[in-house]
Image (cartoon, helix red, strand yellow):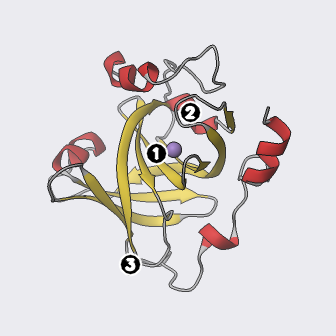
């Protein structure tokens, strides 16, 4: 990985004050994904994919859907270190992203190859990536697509219509807890908050 990829992440944080990881470790296993539920200024879900030694990241205000008809806005955010996939806790008041984080879902993914067999990094450069998730709550294909428009870059996260698509189930509301500790945001805030 290029160490530069984490510059923005580190610049925004004071690691003497926040319990978040500084990053720098390498991984060799299947690429991971994580979705962290983050009660910051506003509640959102951080969708992160391990690509090129970092977690490429998008903030999804409504969270992912299992319904292929639902297009979910995904705002790109700075790359995070791979260790961040294990982070659950409270970012102190006054720090960047202050608020409570739980690991809402995680697992591994593989890219669904396009005709030209490009890798995930190249697909993201091009603005369209399809992945197959193997998580605890989310499974199957998802497409991430950069959309046009002036101003800030935005993407859409949409469930691909496959065997794992589900138009009725909504895990964002029916399965709110951490897949790591079984805790809700409120329980983490109460146990680890200042
Ligand atoms: Mn966030």
Residue located at (64% from left, 41% from top): 99
Point out the residue furthest to the bottom here.
168
Q: Earlier in the sequence, mark 1 or mark 3?
A: 1
Residue occupied by mark 1 = 48
**What is the x, y in percent for residue 152?**
24, 48
- Compared to residue 154, the image places residue 21 above or below, namely above
Residue 26 in view, yes or no: yes
State how far apart marks 2 and 3 are (Cα): 30 Å
Q: Is there a contact, CB below 8 Å, between mark 2 and mark 1?
A: yes
| Quadrant including the C terminus | top right
Point out the residue furthest to the top here.
16
Q: Quadrant of residue 55?
A: top left
Q: Is there a contact, CB below 8 Å, between mark 2 and mark 3?
A: no
Q: Residues within 10 Å of mark 3 (few under 14, many from 20)?
A: some
State how far apart marks 1 and 3 are (Cα): 21 Å
Q: Earlier in the sequence, mark 2 or mark 1?
A: 1
**What is the x, y in percent for residue 167?**
50, 85
**What is the x, y in percent for residue 174?**
69, 73
- Please state which of residues 171 and 190 is positioned toward the viewer in this rendering: 190
Q: Residues within 10 Å of mark 1 (few under 14, many from 20)?
A: many
Residue 33 in view, yes or no: no
| Quadrant including the N terminus | top left
Q: Earlier in the sequence, mark 2 or mark 3?
A: 2
191 sits to left or right of 33: right
Residue occupied by mark 3 = 161
Q: Quadrant of residue 193?
A: top right
Mark 2 secondary-structure assignment: helix
- Please state which of residues 150 and 58 is positioned toward the viewer in this rendering: 150
Mark 1 secondary-structure assignment: strand
**What is the x, y in percent for residue 103?**
65, 47
State how far apart marks 2 and 1 are (Cα): 9 Å
Mark 3 secondary-structure assignment: loop
């Amino acid at each position: 990985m290029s160490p530069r990829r984490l510059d923005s992440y580190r610049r925004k944080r004071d690691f003497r004050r926040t319990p978040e990881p500084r990053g720098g470790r390498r991984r060799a296993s299947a690429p991971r994904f994580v979705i962290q539920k983050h009660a910051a200024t506003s509640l959102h879900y951080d969708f992160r994919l391990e690509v090129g030694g970092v977690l490429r990241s998008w903030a999804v205000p409504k969270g992912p859907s299992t319904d292929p008809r639902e297009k979910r806005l995904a705002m790109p955010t700075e790359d995070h270190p791979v260790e961040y996939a294990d982070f659950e806790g409270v970012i102190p008041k006054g720090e960047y992203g202050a608020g409570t984080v739980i690991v809402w879902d995680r697992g591994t993914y593989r890219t669904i190859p396009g005709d030209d067999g490009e890798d995930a990094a190249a697909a993201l450069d091009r603005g369209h990536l399809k992945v197959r998730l193997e998580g605890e709550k989310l499974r199957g294909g998802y497409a991430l697509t950069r959309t046009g428009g002036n101003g800030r870059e935005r993407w859409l996260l949409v469930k691909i219509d496959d065997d794992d698509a589900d138009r009725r189930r909504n895990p964002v509301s029916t399965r709110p807890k951490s897949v790591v500790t079984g805790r809700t945001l409120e329980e983490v805030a109460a146990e680890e908050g200042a």
